[in-house]
Image (tube, rainbow, N blue to C red):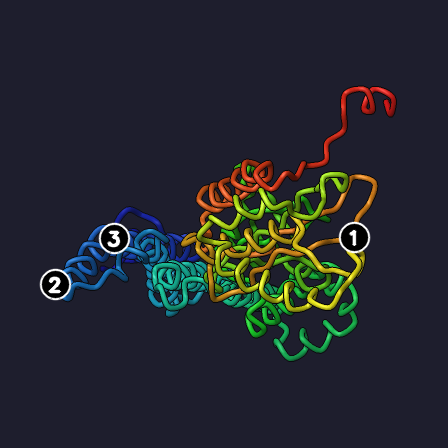
Amino acid sequence: MNISGILERFGIQNERLIEVINVLFTMLVVSLIGWLAYVVAKKFLPKLIKKIAGATRQHWSEWLLDQRFFNRLALLIMPIVLRTGLSPIKWEHMATINRILDIWIVVAIALLVSAFMSGINRVYEKMASVRDKPVKIITQVITVVIWCAVALIIISIFTRESLAVLLGGLTAFAAVLMLVFQDTILGFVAGIQLSSNNMVRLGDWIVMPSRGVDGEVTEIGLTTVKVQNWDKTITTVPTHKLVSESFTNWRGMEESGGRRIKRSVNIDVSSIHYLSDAELATLGSSQLLRRYMEKKLAELAEYNANRASDLDERRLTNIGTFREYMEQWIESNPDINQDMTHMVRQLQPGPTGLPLEIYCFSAKQRWIDYENVQSDLFDHVYAVMPLFNLRAFQYSGEVAAQEQ
């Protein structure tokens, strides 16, 4: 359309004014085309992609739609149309407009790539084989690098300096940049160490007393690791702290097939004695102790055959027999993992008696089941002790009152 001829018919003869109106009209038409391209792409492109993905039974389109990938793709189409359509125009202000459009294109590309990275992260979160890997750290690093590059390109467009010159000038600000991006740099390095050394994964139960952490890892990011504690509170820990500070990861326990029980009961030493004939008869009727006592009594009879003094003889004690009974009881308990270390041992005696420690591994690792196994075990310990004429040490009310 000849805009100049139309304007001349209306009596407009000023060449400068005709030029401006001609440029504005062209820009209006190109802008309208760009806006229509944006609307069409935004409205129909997601539906088209979703239809194609549905036909091939692929779910990647859903993850990209969730991250508004196609909306950002449509946002990129509009400045490209404007840049292409306005490039033939010769006008003194077109250089400024072109720079603005170039910046628009660069930012739109960065938003598009960021959405794509978020979509990739969502895809990996759904994949069982890599779901526990800190993929989010990698995608976040790529996103940070992209936006740093965008910042440099925008500065280059405004200043009309080449990227090589700008990168050379950044060396003077290296210290400032390291200070600003300190957590990001440390988090990136820590993320590589955590991943390569398999130190922590999503779903791991970690304990970090210095940070008040005791729960399950729900998110591993570039700068922070998010942990949901067992009291349902959320604690965030700087990623690099998992490398520079110590923490306990219970994954080994979960993968081992057992969860440790390590608890002792204090025996009143005044209740420890040799077994009497009546006690030998009572305890000898136990299926768990029968073979042990037969073997032990025969061994002691042979040893004591030439001993004239009672002081030189060896005898069965109630504490030793009780210890053997508990070992046999643990070995016959289906809730105890028999492939892992289990024993009943004496610890260093003290003012509170003789500690008798039970050390074994529950075959049930789930917290509630584990606590039930441990409670059942010590319920039996305390209930069966009187049959061996043993007493658990316990402060009397008078002693406790005196100590207070």
Horizontally, residue 373 falls left or right of residue 6, namely right
Foreground: disc 1 or disc 3? 1
Horizontally, residue 19 falls left or right of residue 38, namely right
Identify which amino acid the numbered label 2 is placed on. Answer: Ala
Q: Tell me the residue that label 2 is attached to.
A: 55
Locate residue 31: give its quadrant: bottom left
**Local SS, label 2:** helix
Residue 101 visible in the picture:
no
Identify which amino acid the numbered label 3 is placed on. Answer: Leu
Q: Which quadrant does the N terminus fall into?
A: bottom left
Q: Residue 23 versus residue 336: which sits nearer the camera?
A: 336
Give x and y (percent) for residue 162: 62, 77
Q: CA distance from mark 1 to mark 3?
A: 85 Å
**Local SS, label 3:** helix
**Local SS, label 1:** loop
Q: Tell me the residue that label 1 is attached to.
A: 348
Q: CA distance from mark 2 to mark 1?
A: 72 Å
Give x and y (percent) for residue 81: 33, 63
Question: Badge 2: few (under 14), some or many (20 or more) residues near its Cα, within 10 Å?
Answer: few
Question: Badge 3: few (under 14), some or many (20 or more) residues near its Cα, within 10 Å?
Answer: few
Identify which amino acid the numbered label 1 is placed on. Answer: Gln
Question: Badge 1: few (under 14), some or many (20 or more) residues near its Cα, within 10 Å?
Answer: few
Q: Tell me the residue that label 3 is attached to.
A: 36
Q: Is residue 375 above or below residue 92?
A: above
